[in-house]
Image: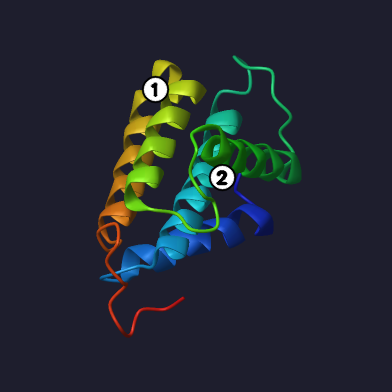
């Protein structure tokens, strides 16, 4: 099954961030969320027989959006003003919590690679984004 417009709209932010040499913290946050949406979609649809999960696109996006925002808050980071350290911590926490690597290590590794690549394009915490980046 291929992702529909909701998942693709989220993942378009990931694609866009991967084409930029530098991304703003908000672009990185949205790109990582888009990667989570696509990875969760792939995971649920490839392993539907092994897991019990709602598979509608809207439900999958809602689950990730809720988890993502809650994790920022739970770990004490601002969703609205993300930092590189905060995104790295949220990524590590969610990846451990979701446990995708136990069932599909290749999918989990690709997700980790893409998210880490996007986060690395952020300015260092406290440094402004480079002029000319989108956002």
- Density class for disc 1 (Cα within 10 Å; few <14, some 14-19, many ≥20) is few
Query: With respect to residue 128, does 99 lie above or below?
Result: above
Relative to the observer, which residue lies in front, 125 or 18?
A: 125
Residue 101, which numbered label?
1
Q: Nearer the viewer, residue 125 or 38?
A: 125
* Element carrying mark 1: helix
Residue occupying the point 74% across, 29% down: 54
Image location (x, y in percent) of residue 14: 44, 59
Where, quadrant-wise, is the N terminus in this rendering?
A: top right
| Left or right of residue 89, residue 58 in this image | right
Q: Could you say where residue 133 lies in the image, as x and y percent from the top left?
A: 35, 79
Q: Compare marks 2 and 1 and give the one earlier in the sequence.
A: 2
Residue extending farthest bottom: 132
Residue bearing mark 2: 37
- Residue at image position (33%, 85%) is 132
Looking at the rendering, which quadrant does residue 19 occupy? Answer: bottom left
State the image coordinates of residue 43 (x, y, percent, origin top left): 53, 31
Residue at x 29% of width, y 43% of height:
113
Q: Which of the two residues, 107 or 128, is positioned nearer the viewer here?
A: 128
Q: Name the residue: 69% across, 18% down.
A: 52
| Quarter occupied by residue 62 | top right
Q: Looking at the picture, does residue 47 appear above or below residue 71?
A: above
Cα–Cα gap, marks 2 and 1: 16 Å
Q: Disc number at residue 70?
A: none
The color scheme shown is: rainbow
- Where's residue 17, x and y in %? 38, 65
Crowding near the residue tagged with mark 2, few <14, some 14–19, many ≥20 C-alpha atoms within 10 Å: many
Q: Is residue 45 above or below residue 81?
A: above
């Amino acid at each position: 099954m291929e992702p529909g417009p909701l998942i693709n709209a989220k993942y378009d932010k990931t694609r866009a961030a991967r084409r930029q040499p530098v991304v703003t913290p908000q672009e990185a946050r949205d790109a990582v969320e888009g990667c989570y949406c696509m990875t969760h979609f792939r995971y649920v649809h490839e392993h539907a027989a092994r897991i019990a999960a709602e598979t509608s696109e809207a439900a999958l996006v809602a689950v990730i959006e809720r988890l993502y925002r809650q994790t920022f808050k739970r770990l004490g980071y601002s969703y609205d003003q993300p930092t590189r350290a905060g995104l790295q911590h949220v990524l590590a926490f969610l990846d451990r919590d979701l446990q995708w690597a136990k069932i599909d290590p290749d999918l989990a590794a690709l997700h980790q690679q893409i998210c880490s690549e996007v986060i690395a394009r952020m300015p260092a915490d406290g440094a402004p984004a480079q002029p000319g980046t989108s956002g």
